[in-house]
Amino acid sequence: MSAMSSYPDDLLYTKDHEWARVEERDGVKVATIGITRFAVEQLGDVTQIDLPKEGESVKQSEVFGSVESVKAVSDLFAPFSGKVVKTNSPLGDSPEYVNEDPYDEGWMIQIALANPDETKSLMDAEAYQAFLRDQAE
Amino acid sequence: MIEHPHAPRKTPLYEAHRRAGAKIIDFGGWLMPVSYPSGIIDEHRATRSAIGVFDVSHMGEVHFRGPRAAEAVQRLVTNDVAKLGDGHALYTVACRPAGGIVDDFIVYRITGEHFLIVVNASNREKDVGWFRENVGTWCEIHDASDETALIAFQGPKAEAVLQTLTAATLSSVRSFDVVPDLEIAGVRTSIARTGYTAEDGFEIFCAAGDADRLWERLIEGAATAGGKPVGLGARDTLRLEGRLCLYGNDLTEETTPLEAGLGWVVKLDGAGDFIGKAALRAQRDSGVARKLVGFVMRGRGVARHGYAIHASAAAGGGAAVGEVTSGTFGPTVEKNIGMGYVPAALAVPGGALIVDCRGKMIEAEIVSGPFYKRGKR
């Protein structure tokens, strides 16, 4: 795994180690959400993921689900407020996708953003990696 | 949590773990590998199918020597030390006068005047203090932990691979045997056929200065059979599948061995007059109020240490009746498993419990016996 692909440039990142890929669909901003390579390495093997149902609302910085790894359970925090338009249902049977491919197969939910300005509060890949370096010190 | 005032300690193999790319955590005041790059599930499976190699040098080695050594050890532990012959070992607990568990460990009889107790890392100072306070004048008690390294070599292929590294005949070393002087890969060791993984295997003691050399050879040997180094993460999933208790979780000063289902190591009718015997006898006669049970989660949820347990709706439901002491996903049994204390009346195999998994009430079923049992050799 190269340093480049550990934190792709086209994503936004939170201090809670979620990533978001924001796209425009029919005039609505939709964000795909997952957890970062750093989070995956901290968690180790993921065994179960609890996600909200499609149609439920989530609020920025609040818990929207949880990840169980062999070691421990961790909360998932919503990067944005909005409605859940889709969840990655294959994760129910194959939680290991999160370990194997956190930015693609391992995505968790898609949110239709209620307040697109919230994207400004996230970090880009460069800022997130600087944040990780600060945390390590 | 216990406070650790000094800087975390390192085992003689710390640098080897760093070189192997292990994720290191502070575990009870020790910097230990929680997992290596292949991950907990892979390490768990390697131990079940081939060999896992564990650095357990953080554990404490306490030697009892002298004509009254056997008497001293018997005063401290609940199991019957008199039945041990030279070169044999047994699992036991040590209790406070009121019956609470000080620690659980294996006692090795090297000779009639030399016993070794291998104590839990987090209890080492407490145990040595307790031993000295009670029997310190009976025999010499030497804490050899700092100069001793301990490597566990566990799994169905452990004997075959270890045999390639020693001239001794390992097939004659049976379960719970200990051989005090044996050369492995040119290193002087003591080995015991004991472990904490629910697999066959060996625990190998050597001088701290020889640990690196021995570790490298054991890892090389294990690799030829599909084995690998294993961290504390998989050590926990392996022991829990085997339903082996962890001190600090399943056993504490507030629990007794009778409550913990360890009555088989408590010899209340034997001649040994151990600390806690009267209290445990009284508890046996009156019956325990709560019991440690094993359970399998029936709904989607992983029980974790500290989660509340409720009675099932059929049994009245309502307020919490107990607490989860250990819980995880079991990679071999492929189920979410756990242990916890519940009122004795509810501790019935097949019975239902409800575990409060962070606000979600998930049903669990009580099961008897280990979650995983290895096949016969």
Image (cartoon, rainbow, N blue to C red):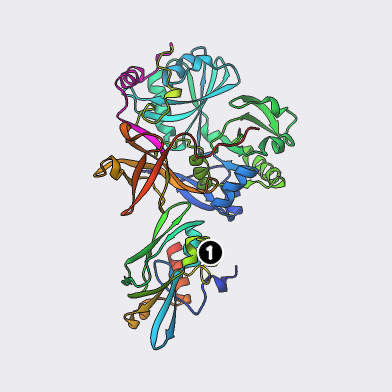
Q: What is the x, y in percent for residue B153?
A: 62, 38
Q: What is the x, y in percent for residue A79?
A: 37, 72
Callout 1 amino acid: Tyr
In the rendered image of this protein, does residue B122 appear above or below residue B71? Answer: below
Q: Is residue B352 magenta?
A: no
Location of residue B55 (image quadrant): top right
Residue at image location 53% in from the left, 48% down from the top: B331
Q: Is residue B281 magenta?
A: yes
How dense is the environment of label 1, judged by Cα within 10 Å: few (below 14), some, or many (20 and up)?
A: some
Is residue A137 visible to the viewer in this orientation of the structure? no
Is residue A28 visible to the viewer in this orientation of the structure? yes
In this picture, which residue range is highlighted in magenta?
B271-294
Q: Disc 1: which chain?
A: A
In the rendered image of this protein, does residue B126 appear above or below residue B5? Answer: above
Q: What is the x, y in percent for residue A24?
A: 43, 85
Q: What is the x, y in percent for residue B79?
A: 46, 20
On the rendered structure, is A92 left or right of B364? right
Assign a secondary structure to mark 1.
helix
Q: Which residue is mark 1?
A: A97
Location of residue B210 (image quadrant): top right
